[in-house]
Image (cartoon, rainbow, N blue to C red):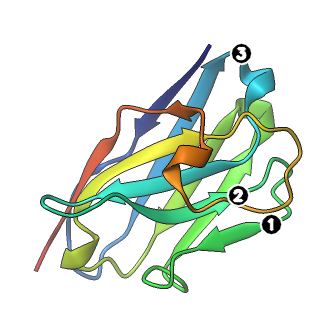
Amino acid sequence: QVHLVESGGGLVQAGGSLRLSCTASGRTGEVYTMAWFRQAPGKEREFVAGITYNGANTNYADSVKGRFTMSRDNAKNTVYLEMNSLKPEDTAVYSCLADSRAFREVVGTRSNEYAYWGQGTQITVSA
């Protein structure tokens, strides 16, 4: 089994920045593509960003392109989401997901493509 733990959430003013981290433990050999999804109250879960196993490819939702950057450090089994120019509409619970399918070169944008999920961390952006 793989266990994902997110950290770095909190309250920030609009225009501010935050960095989320997600660390995998357990059977980390089964962790390949990783992604961030978010869910705001009353809304469906949506893809935010993803990165392939070797960091060569990333994918971002249009709503965060140019503001968010995802990276990974495989030696630490950790991915990061650097979030800049935050907006109130970025307020949501952000969850880290991991894909167990090996060596895919494309980042999936559907949550059902991912085998493992973290508990999530709240991001609140005040106006």
Is there CB contact under 8 Å for labels 1 and 2?
yes
Amino acid on which disc 3 is placed: Arg
Amino acid on which disc 1 is placed: Asn
Side of 24 where 91 appears, left or right: left
Instruction: Name the residue that disc number 1 marks.
Output: 57
Count of labels shown? Answer: 3
Is there CB contact under 8 Å for labels 1 and 3?
no
Q: Which residue is drawn at 48% across and 81% down?
A: 67
Give the mark, 3 or 2, whose residue is nearer the N terminus: 3
State the image coordinates of residue 100 (x, y, percent, origin top left): 73, 33
Query: Disc 3 and disc 2: Cα gap in Å?
Result: 19 Å
Helix, strand or loop for disc 1: loop
State the image coordinates of residue 23 (x, y, percent, origin top left): 57, 32
Helix, strand or loop for disc 3: loop
Instruction: Name the residue that disc number 3 marks.
Output: 27
Q: Residue at x 22, y 77 (%)?
A: 89
Instruction: Name the residue that disc number 2 marks.
Output: 51
Location of residue 12 (image quadrant): bottom left
Query: Disc 1 and disc 3: Cα gap in Å?
Result: 23 Å
Query: Disc 1 and disc 2: Cα gap in Å?
Result: 6 Å
Question: Compared to 7, does 9 lie above or below?
Answer: below
Q: In which quarter of the image is the N terminus?
A: top right
Within 10 Å of the Cα at label 1, are there few (<14), some (14-19), or many (20+) other Cα atoms? some
Side of 52 where 4 appears, left or right: left
Amino acid on which disc 2 is placed: Ile
Side of 38 where 43 appears, left or right: left
Question: Compared to 44, does 10 lie above or below?
Answer: above
The numbered mark at residue 110 is none
